Image (cartoon, grey):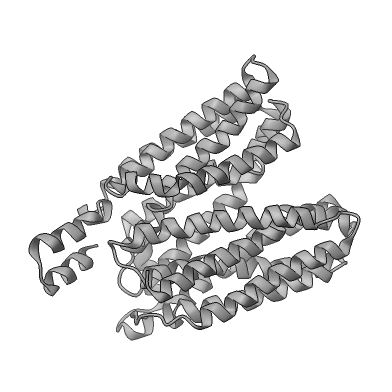
């Protein structure tokens, strides 16, 4: 890795570490510590999703026009101000405004950092770069959540103020780190004659492979990430009798699987077709939902149900580790030159939609209709496999098998061969 990529990865780790401090405790902080009730706490969580949906279309345009680094710095300052104000807010209006600033800043960080990784990597190194990003994000979230859990005290609002202050400090530290990054030159929209904002969105929507990838992405995030802390946890408590401590163990197993398996999985997926790797993830998650079905609907002991439920989260982690070096690099390879920011923001927008709809659908279903919940999401997982195989028909050989770019360079030699291979990628 070059110096720029190292700083980008440090930035990913710091931002995830800061988020890990507060995200698991937002509901408790608003509802109980500030005494604003469950309704306001639910609105705060909804505000995060709404803020992301509002700012992401503009973020993509800004990244394309100005570059990812200025956009990232603005997002970090906004998130830091949101975190600081949330730590001292006591009224419902102040809490909601602070949450909107924090949510907007967090949402814009994702496509900005992803575009920086694209600009600082090649087709040959991109999968490893995104795998490292995902590894550090999960490690940062896990460590931040663990430390934050030992710092908070629900009877002392000042402990939460300290938590949000630490989160803001992480964002501001990240501003200092990222301000030193020297980005390689990458073409921007304003440097490309004949392109406008409207034309860039039209071009994106006219890219059949990208549209299919967005549909696939929606199902991926809806059927997995959108269920972790809503439908699946409700199902575990209501159907399988899982305790809160066991639920925490399951979430830890998910993170541990990602941290332990990420680079072993990377070696496996690097020489496989991207579309088939994503299809395999659908099968892994279908097994996970079947195991969850046994946990809640089987007739085994409570210990067996708990073990099965923890295994479900671990299997989801295995699938996530397979996706991290696959989906994000594919988004970058589908983007025309200078449009990576727009494509990253569009995919992040799809992700936020899925994360907003997933809990709303899965929560009530998982809590009350146990068998239909498992069957429905098992079918969604199998749908991932079908959609991935269909997507494979829309991809070029190098988009689906990126190692061909490198092998053709080695076989043909010469700078011109390198340029042709990268252009096709």
Query: In terms of depth relative to the viewer, which is nearer, 106 or 260?
Result: 260
Question: Which image quarter: residue 253?
Answer: top right
Residue situated furthest top in the rendering: 299
Answer left or right for 409 relative to 291.
left
Q: Residue 51: x and y, percent?
A: 64, 65
In the image, what residue occupies the spot 75% across and 67% down?
164
Question: Which image quarter: residue 385?
Answer: top left
Q: Residue 128: x and y, percent?
A: 37, 58
| Depicted 407 relative to depicted 57: above or below | above
Answer left or right for 351 relative to 361.
left
Residue 203 appears in the rendering: yes
Residue 363 appears in the rendering: no
| Depicted 241 relative to depicted 44: above or below | above
| Depicted 105 relative to depicted 403: above or below | below
Answer left or right for 211 relative to 353.
left
Answer left or right for 205 relative to 94.
left
Query: In terms of depth relative to the viewer, which is nearer, 368 or 129?
Result: 129
Query: In terms of depth relative to the viewer, which is nearer, 6 or 309?
Result: 6
Q: Residue 137: x and y, percent?
A: 54, 58
Quarter of the image for the N terminus: give it.
bottom left
| Depicted 231 relative to depicted 107: above or below | above
In the image, what residue occupies the spot 49% across and 45% down?
260
Quarter of the image for the C terminus: give it.
bottom left
């Amino acid at each position: 890795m070059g110096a720029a990529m190292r700083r980008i990865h440090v930035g990913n780790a710091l931002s995830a570490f800061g988020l890990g401090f507060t995200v698991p405790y937002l509901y408790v902080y608003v509802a109980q510590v500030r005494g604003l009730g469950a309704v306001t706490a639910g609105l705060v969580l909804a505000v995060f999703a709404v803020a992301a949906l509002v700012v992401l279309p503009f973020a993509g345009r800004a990244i394309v026009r100005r570059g990812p680094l200025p956009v990232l710095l603005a997002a970090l300052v906004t998130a830091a101000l949101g975190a600081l104000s949330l730590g001292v807010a006591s009224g419902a209006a102040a809490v909601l405004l602070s949450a909107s600033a924090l949510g907007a800043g967090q949402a814009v960080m994702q496509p900005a950092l992803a575009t920086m990784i694209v600009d600082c990597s090649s087709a040959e190194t991109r999968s490893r770069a995104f795998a490292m990003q995902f590894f550090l994000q999960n490690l940062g979230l896990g460590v931040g959540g663990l430390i934050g859990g030992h710092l908070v005290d629900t009877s002392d609002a000042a402990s939460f103020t300290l938590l949000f202050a630490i989160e803001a400090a992480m964002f501001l530290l990240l501003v200092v780190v990222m301000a030193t990054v020297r980005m390689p030159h990458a073409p921007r929209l304003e440097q490309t004659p004949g392109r406008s904002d409207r034309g860039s969105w039209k071009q994106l929507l006219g890219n059949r492979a990208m549209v299919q990838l967005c549909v696939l992405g929606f199902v991926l995030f809806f059927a997995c990430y959108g269920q972790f802390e809503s439908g699946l946890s409700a199902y575990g408590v209501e159907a399988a009798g899982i305790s809160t401590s066991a639920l925490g163990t399951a979430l830890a197993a998910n993170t541990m699987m990602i941290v332990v398996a990420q680079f072993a999985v990377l070696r496996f997926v690097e020489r496989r077709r991207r579309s088939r790797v994503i299809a395999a993830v659908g099968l892994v998650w279908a097994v996970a939902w079947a195991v969850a079905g046994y946990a809640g609907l089987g007739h085994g002991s409570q210990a067996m149900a708990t073990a099965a439920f923890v295994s479900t989260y671990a299997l989801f982690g295995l699938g996530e580790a397979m996706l991290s070096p696959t989906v994000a690099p594919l988004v970058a390879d589908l983007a025309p030159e200078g449009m990576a920011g727009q494509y990253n923001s569009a995919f992040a927008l799809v992700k936020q939609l899925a994360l907003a709809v997933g809990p709303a659908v899965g929560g009530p279903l998982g809590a009350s209709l146990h068998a239909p919940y498992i069957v429905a999401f098992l079918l969604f997982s199998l749908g991932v496999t079908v959609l991935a195989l269909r997507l494979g028909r829309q991809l070029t050989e190098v988009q689906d098998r990126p190692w061909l770019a490198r092998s053709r360079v080695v076989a043909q030699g010469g700078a011109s061969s390198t340029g042709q291979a990268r252009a096709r990628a």
